[in-house]
Image: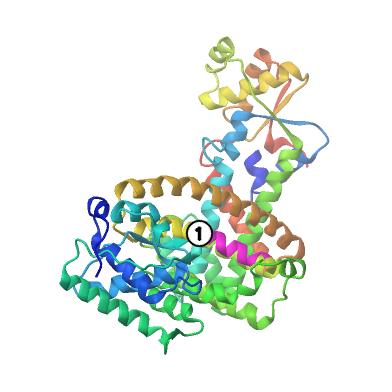
Amino acid sequence: MPDPHPWVVILARNTRLRFAVECLLREANPHGKKFFKVTHFYKMLFLLHMGLKERGVDLKPPYCWYKRGPMLVREEFVRDVGVPLSTYVDKDSTKRITHVSCEGVSREDQYVIQSEVSEIVEKYKEGNYFRDGYIKELLHDAYEYAPHDFQRVFSRMFFPAIEHFKPDDKQTRLFPPALSDYERTNIEKLLDKLVALYPEDEMGELYDTFLEWEDTFRLSLIHEPSKVYGLADDFWEIFCKLLRIRHNENISEKTLDWWVRSFQNDLSEYEGKLERERERLLEIHIREIPPSEGVLKIADGMMAVAYDLAMQKKER
Amino acid sequence: MIIGYIFQRADRWSTPAKAVVEDEEGNHSSDTVWSECFGTTRDGEGKCNTVMKEITHEFRRAIAKLNEGTLPQKVVDFAYGSRWRTRELLENIIKEHAGDCKELVDKLREASRWFEGECKKRKASLKKVVIVHRRHEPYRRLYDILEKSVRDPDDVEVILDAHFVGVKIRGIVLITGDKNDIASNEQVICDNTSIAEVKWLGDVRV
């Protein structure tokens, strides 16, 4: 393999990772075509990392679990590898790599990494080309390693179930699709599943917010189905902001600290937005669906408990 | 009184509180009382919001447990074990419920929505009809006089808030649910402040 430029020796600390990245890109996308996007690259690199770990080679990639699965953290990557991620990716696509840096990587590691790269890339090909829709397989395989079943269901089942409410185009916004009974039942079953799977032990600080979101989502499903995708996406984002704090590898204290601090601000902002949306939907709900006597009796009981609780200090 | 208005229905003050808020006469409150009930974004959410959230959170958690397949009695046991505020209420609901689990979940869900929606609707109504005043006078001399009869310092501050409004608006009537500390000291309050009358909520005619 060709020798690297001399300055690479000084800057690169994680030479194995750099080698693996360049090998993967050279093998998966030798001509720098647009079919091998950033998301394909991240997932394949993650699977490469997990496969190599089993073979005793730790690439130590700086990644976290985020909205679309395992994600390389850009700022950490440049710290580790010595070159910015933009050397390899450009907006949404990956670049052509003709030169692989092997300085600082033992021959044995080079062999193991190269063979694992070949295996992984081949897995998603038919002949010389990647299979149609191979991103779905990549996501499925990556999510097999997801720390929580909740993520698998939310990302891989729930979002697809509400996909056609995604406000991608003017047509969808102008003529929002109707919700069939079958679809509604399916979505509600998935919501029940999400409630059962929520990782309360590890993500307890978001649990009540999650339950509030879940009921707000149900209200939106009844009264404004066109808004459900946005509601889901917003919740998923805040959930993943906590998830990345809990599940990451090779991330610096500085970055973790910033994630923790920014999460609090982001959570306040999100809860405010959810509350406003919920208030609006509740108003519609109460106006359009009058409560039964049984329901009113229970609500009455809740009012009594609320009054007693609020009055534990003196009345004005 | 604000609490009685927000959490109406079961409160014995609720109908008089409703009558006071919804009558034709102007309603005034102080920012101290208001923020105690509803909070400020800086200091917290206030009693009414906090209580409403606590109760709805418990109900949602009960619904979540039932949906997961936890038996209703086990949910009650959990509520007692965790000292939920709504434990007795949930126990009674579950005792009286004759239908299946799904029906129970639907009822709890609707009740929780109704409760929350009504509280928020009333808070919005209150905001439209109550003028909130911010007092910037300490009234030290008055404080010393009042604290000899009114035991709770927070109650003294509320009386001074009402006096502040009374200085601007003649004939102000202080309406309170506190019979022992405030209403019983009507003479002292009216003799020393601009407050024209002190009325106990229980005496308000509906």
- Residue drawn at the location 57% of the way across and 15% of the way down: B138
Where residue B5 appears, x then y in whole percent?
68, 44
Quadrant housing the N terminus of chain A: bottom left
Q: Residue furthest top?
A: B141
Query: In the image, A281: left or right of A253?
Result: right
- Residue drawn at the location 56% of the way across and 67% of the way down: B93
Colour logic: rainbow
Give the image quarter of residue B37.
Answer: top right
Where residue A122 appears, x then y in whole percent?
36, 84
Query: In the image, B170: left or right of B76?
Result: right
Q: Residues within 10 Å of mark 1 (few under 14, many from 20)?
A: some
Give the image quarter of residue A98.
Answer: bottom left
How many numbered marks have been drawn onto this rendered protein structure?
1
In the rendered image, residue A234 lying in the magenta stretch gets the answer: yes
Instruction: Using the image, determine if residue A33 lies above or below residue B117.
Output: below
Camera sees residue B16: no
Residue, disc 1: A237
Q: Nearer the viewer, residue B183 or A135?
A: A135
Q: Nearer the viewer, residue A15 or B82?
A: A15
Which range of residues does the magenta coloring cover? A227-235
Query: In the image, A224: left or right of A229?
Result: right
Camera sees residue A99: yes
Query: In the image, A145: left or right of A262?
Result: left
Quadrant housing the C terminus of chain A: top right
- Residue drawn at the location 59% of the way across and 80% of the way down: A186
In the rendered image, residue B122 lying in the magenta stretch gets the answer: no
* Image mark 1: chain: A
Tell me which amino acid carries mark 1: Glu
Q: Residue furthest bottom?
A: A127
Where residue A171 appears, x then y in whole percent?
74, 70
Type of secondary structure dominating the magenta stretch: helix
